[in-house]
């Protein structure tokens, strides 16, 4: 195996996809992200409570200050029943001596910040590529996308949602080839 050039295919451009790509790039591994959606969307859920460990990850990527500006510190959470009864209150964030509060922000804003940082650092993000199959062969990992776009990565680590990647998570392989096959109408062989 050629250790000088490693490549990772990342399936999914949610919060985790760009984060993984940015860390792999720091480790000298080229990453490409493939996303099923046709384009990026501003809707990505409601909000995230980002605790001090998550903020530590974002600090490593140089995004902690931007997240802090976009979000709000949440020092405590009050929990209510569906009928309006107060159930309790919990402190939210790190211990006082650590000094890092949890930050609450819109998930879509965090996603946008991570995606834009990945693009700024030259990480390729391809939209409209829905993964339909993932396998390994003697040459490496083969990712098959809807419309039969097949990507063979022979020096890569495949990463993505555990449901899609479980069978090839440990596969590390060198090189990348892409081939297009015409989609046959149903019933034809």
Image (cartoon, grey):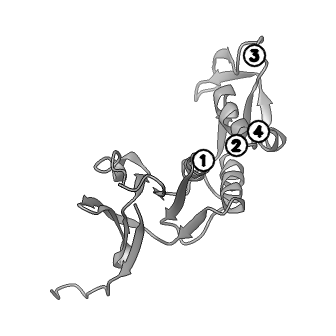
Q: Is residue 72 above or below residue 157?
A: above
Q: Secondary structure at mark 2?
A: loop
Q: Is residue 79 left or right of residue 148?
A: right
The image position of residue 37, as x and y in percent, is 52, 67
**Residue where numbered disc 1 is placed:** 19
* Whole-percent x, y for residue 147 in the image: 36, 79
Q: Which residue is mark 4?
A: 64
Q: Secondary structure at mark 1?
A: helix
Counting residues from the N terminus, which is met first, the one under dot 3 or under dot 2? 2
Q: Going 77% across and 11% down the picture, which residue do you hit?
A: 97
Task: Assess whether mark 3 and mark 1 are in contact (beta carbons under 8 angstroms).
Answer: no
Residue 34 % position (x, y): 49, 64
> Label 3 belongs to which residue?
98
Is mark 2 in CB contact (under 8 Å) with mark 1? yes
Is 96 displayed left or right of 149 in the figure? right
Dot 3 alpha-carbon crowd within 10 angstroms: few under 14, some 14 to 19, many 20 or more: few
| Residue at disc 3, secondary structure | loop
Tell which tag, 3 or 2, sits nearer the viewer: 2
Label 4, label 3: how far apart the Cα atoms are:
16 Å
């Amino acid at each position: 195996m050629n250790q000088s050039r490693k490549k990772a295919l990342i399936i999914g451009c949610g919060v985790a996809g760009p984060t993984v790509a940015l860390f792999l790039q720091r480790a000298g591994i080229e990453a490409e992200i493939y996303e099923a959606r046709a384009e990026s969307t501003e809707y990505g859920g409601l909000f995230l409570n980002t605790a001090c460990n998550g903020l530590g990850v974002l600090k490593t990527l140089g995004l902690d200050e931007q997240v802090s500006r976009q979000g709000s510190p949440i020092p405590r959470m009050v929990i209510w029943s569906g009928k309006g009864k107060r159930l309790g209150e919990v402190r939210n964030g790190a211990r006082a001596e650590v000094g890092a509060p949890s930050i609450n922000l819109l998930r879509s804003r965090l996603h946008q910040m991570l995606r834009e940082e990945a693009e700024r650092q030259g990480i390729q993000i391809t939209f409209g590529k829905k993964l339909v199959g993932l396998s390994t062969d003697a040459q490496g990992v083969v990712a098959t996308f809807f419309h039969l776009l097949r990507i063979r990565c022979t020096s890569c680590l495949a990463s993505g949602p555990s449901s899609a990647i479980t069978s090839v998570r440990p596969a590390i392989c060198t090189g990348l080839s892409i081939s297009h096959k015409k989609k046959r109408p149903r019933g034809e062989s």
